[in-house]
């Protein structure tokens, strides 16, 4: 089987007269919408807002670390800055980034449904997110939180007089937002697939989001109850985590990481979802080993729940339990390796082009490979003793979260930008920004691996002078990285007005979302489609006669 | 560059000459940790090169210009099995290797010298059994295995010596231990690596590794005069512990002689090993588990004795290897000759002397 896919001539493309964007006008039509696509846009705007704040805080952190003493700001200020950076980036950006924007937009389109199962709950989840986000923002403006994003007890419960409870309430609300999103996705995937859309015809994007949703609804309640206990301990002194009252501070670590380790898979699985789609589309090939990739997502979600104690290897847990958790952590690394190899083999005998989303996807593969393999360092018990709580950890999770997830997010935003807006982003400058982001990222975070092995502890406002050169590299890289992130924030809004008209299927991708007009109608499909082919069937796409579906003119 | 600004040039040259890229290897653990590290780095580079080479090769060979027709391939069970089993095998090797190192770091040999370290916001208080007290510094002899017993007085801290490749969390309410044996005399960083509040980055110090002779000289010159056990003995008397723990058969409290590291039968039928954690818990919260044959009449000392005081008491109980010594203490209720200055006040009434370790109300 072989297929020639040629990109359509976009010169003849016209914007559809009617779409979800111009169905109704006015602020009310957005704030009270039940349309998953409009809610996705609401999310896109709000997470971008919080990303800018979190990014600015990251810039402050790197500026402080340019010199060894804490001279730019007081140590308390620095502690607040890195705490807010972590809280905002994790709970308000990374967790909702791909699922709540791209996922929200695409899951119904990909399964052939008119909306998510519960449109009003979907809107409610955005309001909860905004309420949580604004409360966290208020906590920052009113004086900040210096508990770190990890809220370690008894520090957070008895030794800080900052807005810990306020931030906990904000995270609690944002947590419910992600529970509702997960619930919506699971019900939609189970109940609303179009005729012919069997489980193994679902795009891998949907499989990954399904796995993510499972973690969201099983893990997030544990975080919620943990934060409630922290708040109660602060206000009523109930003594659950206080050793002088018979409580156990290690219990907090268990509860917190029982959510927060699976949470890293909430953050990375949707990124993997995007990469599967992008790599397939720009290789014009079905993803190699579809079932292996689909089940590896589920395996990550399941094993991800059984490894939380690897955050606590040095905390005086039983050495035999540490053995078990180290072994399970090694197992969870395997599905990630499977995915990387399958994506690589998807390129084999493909017909590859190098549009911006593909460049980001290549960046993802390289950086995620480093991020994943350095995770093996940390799963290795004896090595973890030296590396944990140092900059090695910081570098490791930034490789996975920023190098992996943020690259995937940008790949996804560029890939589906024509579908969301009906217009193309400017290709040349976006390629430049993809390359700038990659270089900036490496310069920023690679030196941190070396700093970590040297033993530089994380969350230090000041550090010994012999660590300075590597820190200067890191700060310099952050400047480049900042430019790489700034560019899309400029040219993407520009393209809303001046971008070339995209047409229905500018990439000649196979997903159902590409067979309808761009931007889609509010109802998505005038007639519910019938899926009569496998996912990523480029043969079907090539043979499809020109009777393009649903162009309401 | 040197023509533009010689001063700046000099600065840059010095700056680049003096920066560290690899930590010193100063313990018996360090070479093992580094070997493991380089093996992991090797695997990472191999994996990365493999993926990079394949992606680059495919990108060139199968780019659209050269290969306009994609060939659809479903997958390959053989390949899936290959890249499942080979990484799994490699990861399992590291699992075993890492576990061996971990058990080495956290299980000290029985002859190890014990040092107590109490973490508090934002300093490390080091207490040597011989009565040397240090803040943010740790003097140790090279070539002798050392076990550090850690506890925190307030929040979580983490005791990290990068040159030794060891680290251990200091947790409020429980003892944790870490073992190392320094190899090279020198001065090494000591960090707190668990975020602990305002001055977290100021909770740093130095580890001084000395030749054994130098260490002995240092220890002799820096002792406070009373060993931890002697401080504990004084505290034992001051707190009135000897009223019940008389060591006789009619005593209301258990005999403490030879208690350390023995198995104790509790009223519920279980047995517990009387290690440091057991002794500490029995002082603070004696009614939680009651030894068989006794009634829970001992008061709760939670909040009345500082962590340093508890360490003194634990060391004292550990030192009770002879009933004679206990009786002597009961009868005299004063400190023995090891006390540098005679403390007359101890005779005049318990509690009159300022006793280190007792928290003032």
Image: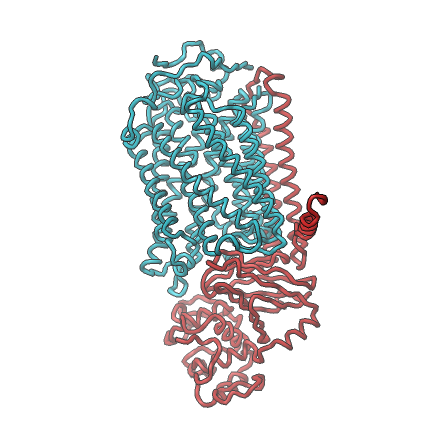
- Which residue: 43% across, 58% down? A155
The image shows residue A358, relative to residue B4, as above or below, that is above
Front one among A432 and B210: A432
- So how many labels did they put on this image? 0
| Image quadrant assignment for residue B287 | bottom left
Q: Quadrant of the C terminus of chain A?
A: top left
Q: Please give left or right for residue A46 compared with residue A470 in the image.
A: left
Q: Please give left or right for residue B13 compared with residue A257 in the image.
A: right
Answer whether residue A171 is visible to the viewer in this image: no
- Measured from the top left, where is residue A305 in percent x and y? 45, 44
- Which residue: 51% across, 75% down? B312
The image shows residue A553, relative to residue A250, as above or below, that is above
* Chain letter matching colour red: B
Q: Please give left or right for residue B203 compared with residue A131 in the image.
A: right
| Image quadrant assignment for residue B129 | bottom right
Answer whether residue A393 is visible to the viewer in this image: yes
The image shows residue B121, relative to residue A323, as above or below, that is below
- Which residue: 29% across, 25% down? A25
Front one among B11 and B305: B11
Q: Which color mode does the image show?
A: by chain
The image shows residue B328, relative to residue A162, as above or below, that is below
- Measured from the top left, where is residue A48 in percent x and y? 42, 36
| Image quadrant assignment for residue A98 | top left
As drawn, the residue found furthest toward the front would be B4
Q: Quadrant of the N terminus of chain A?
A: top right
Task: Please identify which colour was used for chain A in the image.
Answer: cyan
- Measured from the top left, where is residue B305 in percent x and y? 44, 73
Front one among B23 and B265: B23
């Amino acid at each position: 089987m072989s297929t020639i896919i040629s990109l359509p001539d976009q010169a003849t493309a016209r914007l559809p007269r009617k779409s979800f964007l111009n169905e109704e006008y006015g602020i009310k039509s957005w704030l009270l919408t039940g349309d998953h696509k409009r809610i996705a846009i609401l999310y896109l705007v709000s997470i971008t807002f919080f990303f800018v704040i979190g990014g600015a805080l990251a810039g402050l952190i790197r500026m402080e670390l340019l010199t060894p003493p804490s001279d730019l700001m007081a140590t308390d200020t620095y502690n607040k800055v890195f705490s807010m950076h972590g809280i905002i980036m994790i709970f308000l950006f990374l967790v909702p980034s791909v699922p709540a924007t791209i996922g929200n937009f695409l899951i119904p389109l990909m399964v052939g449904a008119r909306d998510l199962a519960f449109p009003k709950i979907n809107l409610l989840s955005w309001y909860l997110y905004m309420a949580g986000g604004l409360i966290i923002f208020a906590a920052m403006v009113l004086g900040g939180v210096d508990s770190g994003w990890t809220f370690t007890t008894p520090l957070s419960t008895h030794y800080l007089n900052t807005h810990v409870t306020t931030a906990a309430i904000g995270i609690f609300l944002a947590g419910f937002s992600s529970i509702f999103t997960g619930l919506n996705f699971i019900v939609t995937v189970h109940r609303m697939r179009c005729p012919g859309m069997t489980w193994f015809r679902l795009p891998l994007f949907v499989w990954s989001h399904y796995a993510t949703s499972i973690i969201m609804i099983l893990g997030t309640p544990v975080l919620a109850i943990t934060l409630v206990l922290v708040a109660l301990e602060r206000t009523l002194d109930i003594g659950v985590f206080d050793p002088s009252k018979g409580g156990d501070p290690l219990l907090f670590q268990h509860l917190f990481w029982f959510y927060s380790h699976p949470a890293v898979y909430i953050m990375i699985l949707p990124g993997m979802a995007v990469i599967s789609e992008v790599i397939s589309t720009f290789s014009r090939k079905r993803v190699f080993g579809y079932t292996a990739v689909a089940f590896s997502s589920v395996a990550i979600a399941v094993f991800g729940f059984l490894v939380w104690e690897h955050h606590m290897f040095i905390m005086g847990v039983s050495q035999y339990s540490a053995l078990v958790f180290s072994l399970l952590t090694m197992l969870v690394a395997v599905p990630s390796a499977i995915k990387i190899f399958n994506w690589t083999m998807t390129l084999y005998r493909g017909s590859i082009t190098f549009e911006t989303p593909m460049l980001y996807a290549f960046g993802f593969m390289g950086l995620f490979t480093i991020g994943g393999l350095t995770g093996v360092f940390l799963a290795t018990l004896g090595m973890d003793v030296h590396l944990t709580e140092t900059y090695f950890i910081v570098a490791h999770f930034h490789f996975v979260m920023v190098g992996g997830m943020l690259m995937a997010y940008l790949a996804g935003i560029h890939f589906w930008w024509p579908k969301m807006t009906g217009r193309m982003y400017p290709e040349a400058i976006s390629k430049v920004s993809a390359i700038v982001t990659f270089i900036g990222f490496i310069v920023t975070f690679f030196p941190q691996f070396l700093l970590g092995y040297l033993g530089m502890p994380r969350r230090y406002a000041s550090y010994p002078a012999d660590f300075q050169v590597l820190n200067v590299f890191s700060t310099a890289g952050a400047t480049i990285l900042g430019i790489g992130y700034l560019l899309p924030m400029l040219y993407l809004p520009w393209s809303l007005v001046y971008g070339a008209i995209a047409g229905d299927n500018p990439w000649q991708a196979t997903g159902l979302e590409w067979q309808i007009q761009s931007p889609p109608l509010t109802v998505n499909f005038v007639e519910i489609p019938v899926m009569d082919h496998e996912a990523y069937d480029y043969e079907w796409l090539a043979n499809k006669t020109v009777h393009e579906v649903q162009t309401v003119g | 560059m040197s023509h533009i600004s010689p001063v700046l040039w000099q600065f840059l040259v010095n700056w680049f000459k003096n920066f560290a890229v690899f930590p010193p290897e100063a313990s018996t653990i360090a070479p093992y940790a580094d070997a493991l590290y380089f093996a992991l780095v090797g695997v990472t580079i191999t994996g990365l090169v493999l993926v990079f080479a394949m992606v680059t090769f495919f990108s060139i060979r199968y780019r659209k210009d050269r290969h306009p027709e994609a060939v659809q391939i479903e997958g390959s069970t053989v390949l899936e099995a290959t890249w499942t089993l080979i990484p799994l095998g490699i990861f399992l090797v590291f699992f075993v290797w890492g576990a061996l190192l971990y058990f080495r770091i956290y299980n000290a040999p029985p002859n190890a010298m014990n040092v107590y370290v109490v973490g508090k916001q934002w300093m490390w208080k080091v207490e040597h059994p011989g009565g040397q007290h240090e803040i943010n510094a740790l003097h140790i002899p090279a070539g002798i295995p050392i076990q550090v017993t850690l506890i925190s007085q307030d929040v979580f801290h983490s005791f990290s010596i990068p040159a030794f490749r060891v680290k251990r969390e200091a947790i409020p309410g429980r003892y944790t231990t870490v073992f190392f044996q320094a190899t090279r005399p020198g001065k090494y960083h000591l960090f707190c690596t668990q975020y602990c509040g305002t001055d977290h980055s100021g909770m740093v110090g130095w580890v001084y590794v000395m030749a054994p002779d130098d260490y002995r000289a240092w220890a002799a010159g820096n002792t406070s005069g009373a060993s931890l056990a002697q401080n504990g003995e004084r505290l034992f008397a001051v707190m009135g512990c000897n009223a019940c723990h008389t060591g006789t058969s009619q005593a209301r409290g258990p005999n403490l002689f030879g208690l350390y590291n023995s198995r104790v039968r509790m009223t519920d039928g279980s047995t517990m090993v009387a290690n440091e954690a057991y002794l500490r818990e029995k002082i603070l919260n004696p009614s939680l588990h009651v030894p068989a044959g006794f009634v829970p009449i001992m008061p709760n000392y939670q909040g009345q004795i500082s962590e340093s005081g508890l360490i003194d008491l634990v060391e004292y109980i550990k030192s009770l290897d002879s009933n004679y010594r206990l009786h002597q203490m009961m009868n005299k209720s004063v400190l023995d000759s090891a006390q540098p200055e005679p403390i007359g006040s101890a005779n005049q009434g318990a509690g009159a002397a300022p006793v280190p370790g007792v928290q003032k109300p």
